Image (cartoon, rainbow, N blue to C red):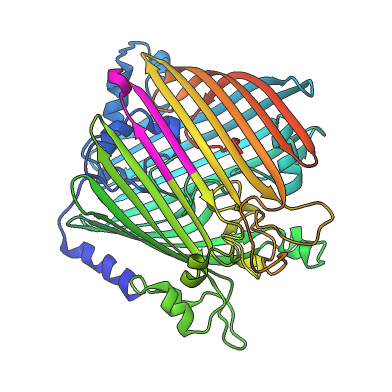
Amino acid sequence: MRFVITIVLCSFFTTSVSAQNSNLLLGNNYSSNFNHLIYNDNYHTAFKPIIKSDLKFDVDSILELQEQSNFSNWYLRKIFSEHFILLKGEDYRVIASPIINFSNGKEFVDEKNTSTNTRGFIVEGDLGKKISFFSSFAENQSIFPNYIDVHIRENLVVPGQGYARDFKETGFDYAMSSGYVSYRANKMFTVQFGHGKHFIGDGYRSLLLSDNSFNYPYLRIQTTFWKVQYTNLYTEFQDINYFLNNGLDNYDQMGYAKKYMSAHYLSINATKKLNISLFESVIWRMNHAPGGNGFDVNYLNPIAMLRPIEFSVNSPDNVLVGVNLKYKLPFSSYLYAQLLLDEFTLEQIKSNNGYWANKFAYQLGYKIFNSFGVKHLTLQTEYNLVRPYTYAHHNPQQNYAHYNQPLAHPLGANFSEFLLLINYKWKKFIFDGKIISSKYGGDIKGDPFSYGSNVYVNYNDRPADFGIDMYQGNLTTVNIKNFNIAYIVNPKTNLKINLGVTLRDFKNEDGELQTQFINFGIKSDLFNHYYDF
């Protein structure tokens, strides 16, 4: 806590810095407009959302240049090129806009009509040169294609978007809000308190921390100096099944069980081409001293390594460590990689005997902008692998998950995945293509053992200590092909008219589920919704 107080006091002895201390939105489609500017410079890119004042360019100016329209009519400007509300004075700026998603579709295998009806808003502003804020809200009613519908009914949540309540028997009603306040004390220190998500990595997926799950309250402290950026992240997560799993049927009226995470992320631009970043996190439920409960102050230390602290207090908490790498290559491209270690024993790895506690994950990827000399053509390929039982815990309430969803990859663990992504922009049209091939070992119906895919299952219920292989259990393959064509109506809110086609083939020992889905609509595409699993 003394570290936080020191940051606040520093603000009284420093000169003003530039405003716009709000975050870049996490949406991949929204940031595709200027990602090449970020990755071709020497920014710290992996910890997201990136704070706008860390950039050398103004995002709004980039979007205005891309619009290149000068409507004299107020209504046309608001629809096609501006935020709905803009309040601006000498020492303040506030913008606000509605966000929508009105779409309809058809799932042909089950002959099912689908739809989404979203109404909401975003508000963002700067007060003086040090304080920025953001708020968003979305109310939704949706009828989903077959595989997403099955997933929601099993897990009670719409992926990444909150608790699902029944809507007209075949659909779901759900809502999500987010917001934060940022305070930039000086060029070195930024403090942010809010309710939202984060993403660590330079790829499409993250094996360290992803925006795959629901929003959570957090405190973020970012320190930047020389070639270093150091981030502390303190969060509160929820286990929405805790009371139900413990025989308390009225859990919905009791609130949800809480757990906490403390994470450190150190990013170093070792050279103009190479970035090396170190990650560590700990998940805990309570102070383990006799009679103690609540927030464990040992994990508030902003600098000390978490693994030695966990060991020194004889803690059963869940600690993860990892590395993120990025290396810039010619032709506006870069290689990236991640390695995550949950548990491992070097002796057992050398013996190659399939020891269950050798729990690790890795990612390899490559991304190129303006591919083959074609402006605005971006290609990306990525491979992810996660060993069985990674992210799980002997106490499922201390797993690396939140709100019935993994905090890293949507498939959990015991899987491998290959992705190929294509994005091309021509004038106001955007073409997106995605091919995903994954394989994992799921649990077997009627079998009491955990085979390492579901991070919510106690890993002590495993079939053996040795001979634990990838894809053990119910071998499952998933192949997804997705194509979207969109026309940008308003770049400020990424409002687009979109036509999308999804083909999905799911197979395992129990059978097969095919999805042939087409949808059309108009939507504000600002946030990531991961339905590709």
- Whether residue 415 sits left or right of residue 35 in the image: it is right
At 72% across and 52% down in the image, what residue appears?
Answer: 473
Does 377 lie within the magenta span?
A: yes
Q: Work out whether residue 240 can be spotted.
A: yes
Residue ID at (21%, 45%): 18
Q: Is residue 477 above or below residue 358?
A: above
Residue 129 coordinates in the image, percent (x, y): 24, 48
Check the image and report above or below for 185 versus 288. above
- Name the foreground residue: 126 vs 281: 281
Residue 336 image position (x, y, % from top left): 36, 44
Residue at left offset 62%, top offset 87%:
291
Q: Outermost residue, front direction? A: 351
Q: Quadrant of residue 165?
A: top right
Magenta: main secondary structure: strand
Res 156 seen here: no
Which image quadrant is residue 502 in? top right
Residue at the outermost bottom position = 290
Q: Where does the N terminus fall, quadrant-wise?
A: bottom left
Residue 300 at x, y = what percent? 42, 73
* Left or right position of 164 against 9: right
Q: Nearer the viewer, residue 109 or 236?
A: 109
Answer whether residue 46 is magenta in the image.
Answer: no
**In this picture, which residue range is highlighted in magenta?**
364-383
Q: Is residue 275 above or below residue 74?
A: below
Horizontal and vertical percent for residue 385?
52, 49
Locate residue 484 relative to residue 32 in the image: left or right: right
* Residue farthest to the top, as pictured: 72
Q: Is 398 or 11 nearer to us in this picture?
A: 398
